[in-house]
Image (cartoon, rainbow, N blue to C red):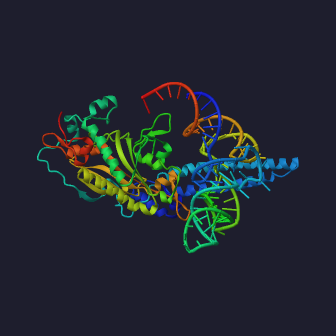
Amino acid sequence: MVDIKYIKENADLVKKNAVDRNVKIDVDKILVLYEKKVNAQIKADGLRQKRNENSLKMKSQLSPGERLKLVEEGKEFKNAISVCEEEERKLERELNEELNKVPNMTHETTPIGKTDKDSKELRKVGKIRNFNFKPKDHVEIGQDLDLIDFDNASIVSGQKFYYLKNEGALLELALTQYGIKKLIEKGFTPYLTPDLAKNTILEGIGFNPRGDETNIYSIENTDLCLVGTAEITLGGLYYNKLLKEEDLPIKMVGFSHCFRTEAGAAGQATKGLYRVHQFSKIEMFVICKPEDSDDMLEFLRNIEEEIYQEIGIPYRVLDVASGDLGNPAYKKYDLEAWMPGRNDYGEITSTSNCTDFQSRRLNIKYKNTEGKNIFVHMLNGTVIAVPRVIISILENFQNEDGTIDIPKILIPYIGKDKITKR
RNA sequence: GGAGAGAUGGCAGAGCGGUUUAAUGCGGCGGUCUUGAAAACCGUUGAAGCGCGAGUUUCCGGGGGUUCGAAUCCCUCUCUCUCCGCCA
């Protein structure tokens, strides 16, 4: 959520930003609603003040006549206040509805453009293999080596589910172990997180739990949703908390299952593991002081790059365009891995600086040395989105004889250096 | 799942219809003392909104109600603790 005071003082900037981000908002309506709401509030305050004065008079000894008169006055205040408060609540609801649509402001270095095509490629890292045979895609490899079972998953759970099997299963465990260990070395605290979270937390992080465009599964008859990412549960961890300055930065790495409805994604090129309803993911989450978040984003991006260099997957780094940032992000980097099966790059990690957009609604602040309470900045980044890393490994590390080399860094976790046909 | 107890400022913890503008302690901040620090002592210290300010309103787990007036009474939900049951 963007600070209403900021919107009031920078209406033109907010309008321009929404255009850059390809988001439709009505700033003028927001300002009108805000003014109306404040006026209703002032009116209610005045009435409450009179009511309080009235009830204060009744503390002293009074004649029955005087008391009765004051009680009657009090009743009138009571009715007037209730009318005024109703109006105030209505305006506040309307205001919040509009306010929730307002995207975060955008970093000055972020490329301006409406779609992902406008993202800026910063660099390519790693050598793309020139196969002297026709490389298979991961679906074929998974079938040949008995690593992934889509057919039976679709019987048990439906389309876009899968079983990981044999070394496919081991790869998830290996990547998880490797990722967590790596992040511990970088000073992160490891977490295994709940896979369900409350609506209020989802909304605080910037997800829309219900509605047509939601990508989130909600649980019937509860206010719970299956999380789409551990960003939700890690970010929600400090909901309504006041932190001390020396607590910061808080660096967490969490494992969770991620559930996504992927409604409307049917037509896209989504073969195999690339776009699925459930997957496992290792996610970084950082809470820090506002002045540190720019550097922290580079820190997170560096960790991601280090990991894919270490595994040995060629990738490119994108500075994501304004129109493709999503509402909470102020700046975002994507890593896209080379996937021979697609003959193209595919998104493998994403790291965002969400500044105080999330902390404002989650009410997470820290007390600085002057004793002022300041909204923290919050950042998140992917370490390992398991299925997409498995795609990248299977497709990039395949041999002509149909075997797969295990990336060196993962051999200790799997206990062999090659996947062969059994 | 059953029974009981509880949820109060950064933390701990009193208050249980109208001098509560929420006691007290810890922690934080400032000071005295000290070469410096600790201890001790003194002072200060919740959040949010509106207002230039004086000030004022709201907030005692969430929501609703009773009342002229609610942290305090009632209903309801959530969570925590204790005991019992069930269970990987």
The C terminus of chain A lies in quadrant: top left
Q: Is residue B47 above or below residue A169?
A: below
Residue A28 visible in image? no
Front-most of A180 and A398?
A180
Residue A171 location (% of width, % of height): 27, 41
For the point 81% across and 51% down, the residue is A59
Location of residue A16 by image quarter: bottom left
Q: Is residue A310 left or right of residue B65?
A: left
Circle count: 0
For the point 54% across and 58% down, the residue is A31
Residue A409 location (% of width, % of height): 25, 48
Residue B85 location (% of width, % of height): 53, 25
Q: Is residue B85 above or below residue A369?
A: above
Residue A100 visible in image? yes
Q: Is residue A341 left or right of residue A76?
A: left
Direction left: furthest residue: A132
Front-most of A163 and A85?
A163
Front-most of A71 and B75?
B75
Residue A420 location (% of width, % of height): 17, 37
